[in-house]
Amino acid sequence: MAIDNVPLQEILEQIQTGVVQLPDFQREWKWDDQRIRELIATVTLNYPLGVVMTLETGGRSPFSSRRLVGAEAAAETDPNQLLLDGQQRLTSLFQALHVDQPVQTTDSRGAELALWYYVDIAKAVGAESDRDDAIVSVPADKILKKSFSRRMELDLSDPHGECTAGFFPLHIIFDEGRIAKWQQRFVELGQANWDLWPRFNKSVIGRVQAYNIPVIKLPSTTTTDAVCSVFERVNTGGVPLNVFELLTAKYAGDREYGSEHGQHYQLVAQWERIRKNLSDKYTVFGGSDNDESNGLLNSEFLQAVTLVHTWERKQNRSAASVSCKRRDLLDLPLAEFDRLYPVLEQAFGWVGEFLAQQYIVHPADLPYRSQLIPLAAVRAILTLRGVQSIDAAMMERITRWYWCGVLGEMYGGSTDSRFPRDVEQLIAWTDADAPTPDTIEEALFLDERLNTLATRVSAAYKGIIALLCKQGAIDWYYNQTPFTQASLLNQAVDIRQIFPKKWFTGRKVTAPANPNSIVNKTPLSNRASRNVVGAPSAYMPVLASESGCRNEWFDDVVATHLIDPATLRRDDFESFYADRAKQLLGLVAEAMGRSTVTREISER
């Protein structure tokens, strides 16, 4: 890594010719007018701006690149340096001091502006403390009007108007020929200007033309992961980049692919096609990458691809371990992604079907999105090994693993080590004699956990609701058949309190019973929930009547929710709670393939 003091003029010329460009993962980001004026004032005073950082490419950039704003029209060329830190400073200076067109910026409220920048010569040769006031921005037409008035104040639309006003145009400051002509017009206007010009030339023009910027140059041998890490550390003011954006730029810059196909690889377009195909077929994958609460994210898809890639490398002994950390994703070769993504797209389709079989059909009801990553990777690896359909025994194992992860809340913390372990152990578990995966062995569900599961924040909460539907719960209004995957969506099924909140007004509840816990909640259609008002003994006959169901038959419907209807008909909350908690614990134990654990046992 080298540090050089590079003349500002040289850097701006390199930007113009394309020697210096931006890596494509750099986001567009405009400085506002005030910051640009302050920046220019800093340069005219020869104050330091801070270090700029570039990556030397050696003629072969690891990323796709683009020109800085204002330099787009120059002839296409490969960059020798990619600008990692200093984009806004150099873009602002390039547009204001080097380009013969208005600077594209914003005001303090974010409104778009196109401005020219000038120096008020009379103010600039005064006290340096007044230098900020000497830097002036004017509209694109170069007509500066008084505030709150249409009356013209200054007309800078031609050199005569500029000289008359004593406003020097900064965009010509590195053009000696234009400066000379401007100077001649200026001094011809009177003796006072003869006296001003030498002082202005020395204190402003000379300083800008001699201004140097320290540039740290990372060598072309710097790894992609290191480049991205450095970029994110120095760009603390921007939005952190994600791996998908970095890979988008890296793949677009892949020369072998470009030479073979005659165009850049378009990862964004590829992902949009994959996402649309999956979300069109499986509602659980709905949403987009812009909504963190919904859908399947591109980062999750990339992690699954990388798990498969590193698993294959470990099998052929070209990698030491299975992994999908950030470093592994950034090292994923384009050729490998292009080979594996169709297999993973198919695998996520299988995952969508698997989730539907578990009665998880809406993004908001998905316990853990992260758990889908190793699940899809496992299905993809089985496909690559020639397994086109999973037999009943293996499906039972995978289902048990899934519910242990959900109900044991195993994916709520760090997953860096769990992902590869689950992939390797589940693949090995295709052999019935192989050890049981750690996620199953380590998963626990404490009996008392039921009392604290109160919102969708918990994966176990969502899981138990899905299991209630899966085991055959019937809606209390549409009570002809159990819930189906379609009816969960069509009937606007949501989670409702069985003993309504208002029923508890003025009543004391004995612990551990908790009116807000999942024990007092169940999935019901929006239509049924309208009648769940007041005491259960009062609303049950109404629901039975409105749904055309005899009371004794309606009791059978209620029982499909693992509820003793007799406790509801006598409004006995404590008895209801104890019975239902016992039944829900049995449901959990069956899904996990093991008993739930009491606090006393767990503490031994």
Image (cartoon, rainbow, N blue to C red):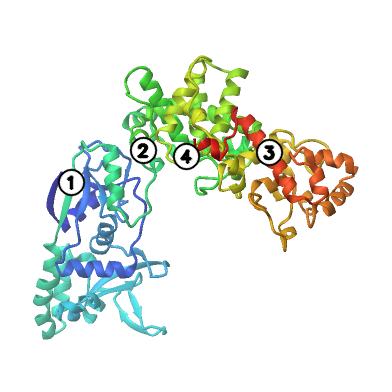
Task: Give the amino acid type for the residue marked by disc 3 in the picture.
Answer: Lys
Label of residue 436 in the image: none
Q: Secondary structure at mark 1?
A: strand
Which residue shows up at 61% across the image and 39% down it? 463
**Among the two numbered marks 2 and 3 on one chain, the one whose residue lies closer to the N terminus:** 2
Residue 17 shown left or right of residue 65 in the figure: left
Name the residue carrying label 3.
582
- Can residue 296 be seen here? The reply is yes
Task: Give the amino acid type for the residue marked by disc 4 in the picture.
Answer: Asn
Name the residue carrying label 4.
298
Marks 2 & 4, CB-CB < 8 Å contact: no
Pick whichever, 302 or 14, lies toward us. Answer: 302
Cα separation between marks 3 and 1: 66 Å
Marks 4 & 1, CB-CB < 8 Å contact: no
- What is the quadrant of residue 58 in the picture? top left
Cα separation between marks 2 and 4: 13 Å
Q: In x, y percent, where is residue 222?
A: 22, 38
Residue 69 shown left or right of residue 368 in the figure: left
